[in-house]
Amino acid sequence: MASAVAGTSFLDTTVTGGATYSYVVTAASDAAGACESARSACASVVPTGDCGLAPSFPGAVAGGSAGLASCTINVSWAAASPYCLGDVRYNVYRGTTSSFVPSPSNRIARCVIGTSFADSVSLPYGAARWYIVRAEDATTGHGGPCRGGNEDTNAVAVSAAADGPTSVGTWSDDAGDTGTAKMNTAVPWVVSTTGGHNAPDSYEASSSDGVCADLRTPTLTLADPGQGPQLTFWSSDDLEYDPTGEIAGTEGSVGQVEIAIGPSFSGWTRVPLTPDYPTSVDFPYNDCPTTQNPGRYFTGNLLTYTQYQASLSNWAGGDVKIRFHLSGDHLFPGGHWWIDDLAVTKAMVPGSCTTIGAGPPPVPDGGPVPGAPLRASRSGTSVSLTWDASQCTATAVNVYRGAIGSYGAFTGGTCNLPDTGSATVAIPDNSWFIVAATDGATTDGSYGEASTGAQITYGGASTACPAITSHVTNNGCP
């Protein structure tokens, strides 16, 4: 950090308050650091003053569809560690491309407590969305969108597409011609934009000496054996091959289809095909354990696509993964293998989901939603309420109430009040109450959040205000 310091003291002006710093000192015979001594013992200090260090946070870990009838994506992350004192909350940003830059305009949630968030606002079925999550500490005056704290600047984006509940159907993948390519590729497998069966895209692998590489499906759940699940795909190849047997018997780089069952997905088994694998190999000369037996494989000059089928009944009734396994020959290592237009029938596949818009917003109260805190004061025999209506504008509000000592349900209310930021209502003695935003018709929004960040729920909204038939809390009004 510093060198050639003369004297017996040093002033470090680069520190920030509230964080721990540790120092060691060495001595040297000259300014160039010659004959440097061993390090001294370590001394630590926590400077006073403002703490400006953002939390240590690696960003979002995963995103995935919730599989609900209403399109919903779950985003998760590991807990951040603050350098400054206080707890950490999280701000969530959403974009339509992987290169989007977080900003107030694409922030969809703020002050999230915990390590997950469910996004269900205006998500189209099957369309990919990208998420960046940032951590913010409990300091103030540093510009963070939650409490003005230090917000980290990670740019880790995870993506997911919303779909609905699963049902028995056909899983298919055309390598991206009509949707997202779904197979997992390991080098040298790639998604190619040329050489496809019915359309340009295909899965392609370039063989080489010593390669053992898989093109692998995600986990597929097959229906019971009686329904007869079946695999179909199209294949072509020009894998290098010695049909004459002049060197060491008929050999070459080979490919075969294999399957493994969950949950471990180990012990890969060769899948019989109809028609049979096209070429006989007498002497497989590769290092891949599942392709060292003489037999029939994909190899040779077969550049015209052929469709193959396989019954999966022997593995039905549970989770499986299917892989297209390429083994590069030592003497004839080159060539390519193309796979396209895969389908697995009688598999559990996600259905469609319904896009839902944002529900009524929460009433700003200076907590998770920005704004002046909700205030209540006596006004004659009634109660005067004021809140910040400008930060998160609602169509109307309901004031729900219940009896102190019984907090499970509303027992009455004043309904469909204008969202002017103030209201004066008659509330009986010994009552508790909340102010909830509504859409001015049948739906109300958030009743508030517990200390864990979970939504607080009460029954009896339709008893208190008969027009209310739906409760939606998916608008965080960030």
Image (cartoon, rainbow, N blue to C red):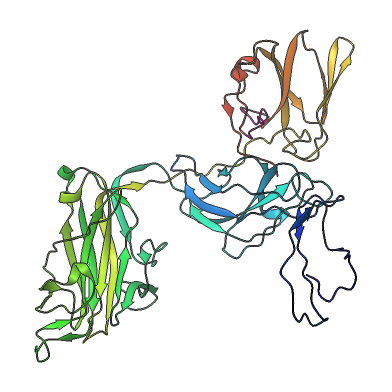
* Vertical placement of residue 357 versus 40, above or below: above
As for residue 454 lying within the magenta part, the answer is no
* Vertical placement of residue 181 versus 133, above or below: below
Give whichever of 307, 26 is nearer the camera: 26
* Vertical placement of residue 437 versus 400, above or below: below
x, y (%) of residue 476?
66, 40
Quadrant showing the N terminus: bottom right
x, y (%) of residue 420?
82, 31
Give whichever of 297, 392 is nearer the camera: 297
* Vertical placement of residue 154 versus 91, above or below: below
Tell me the residue at 64%/35% (across/down).
Answer: 453
Q: Is residue 117 toward the left or the right of residue 344 in the image?
A: right
Q: Is residue 159 toward the left or the right of residue 145 in the image?
A: left
As for residue 442 lying within the magenta part, the answer is yes
Residue at the extreme bottom of the image, as rendered:
246
* Magenta segment boundaries in residue numbering: 441-453
